[in-house]
Amino acid sequence: MKDVIKYKEYLGSVHFSAEDEVFYGKIEGVDDLVTFEGKTVNELKQAFTEAVEDYDDLCIKTGKSGEKSYKGSFNVRIAPELHREAARKSIELGISLNQLVEKAIRQMISIRGSGA
């Protein structure tokens, strides 16, 4: 994992501003913009934790879900050669290209989740 911190079920992006000499980030995967910052790694982690707790409280008070809503469809841009090979593989397997891509994503998430 790169430049990401976790707390509860939330992910936070992590960046560094050399000009301001501060670490900063935002909570990813939510419909709202929730940011945090700190001068040290420990301050950044604490600010992220506080931002998540505050966001959770706000969601409870307003009755909204803390998770971003997803439609289940997205555009993928890949090299034409890879597109051709994926289409051929889906034909060989007797499945749609969408099913092939979903299967590949499920496998990748499973591998990543197991520590690879």
Image (cartoon, helix red, strand yellow):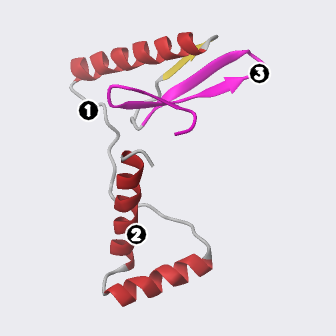
Q: Nearer the viewer, residue 97 or 116?
A: 116
Residue 10: where, in percent of width, then height?
A: 38, 30
In the rendered image, which quarter is residue 115 located in? top left
Task: Look at mark 2 in the image and give the residue it sits on.
Answer: 101
Whichever of labels 1 and 3 marks the residue nearer the N terminus, that label is 3
- Residue nearer the viewer, 29 or 61: 29
Q: How far apart are marks 1 and 3 (CA)?
A: 35 Å
| Image vertical order of residue 13 relative to residue 76, above or below | above
The stretch in magenta equals: 1-28
60 w.r.t. 97: above or below: above
Give the residue displayed 30% in from the left and 20% down from the top: 56
Q: Does the magenta stretch include residue 88?
A: no
Disc with the residue nearer the chain's start (1 vs 2): 1
> For mark 3, what is the residue?
18
Q: Residue furthest right?
A: 19
- For residue 22, what is the image quadrant? top right
Residue located 39% across and 78% down the image: 97
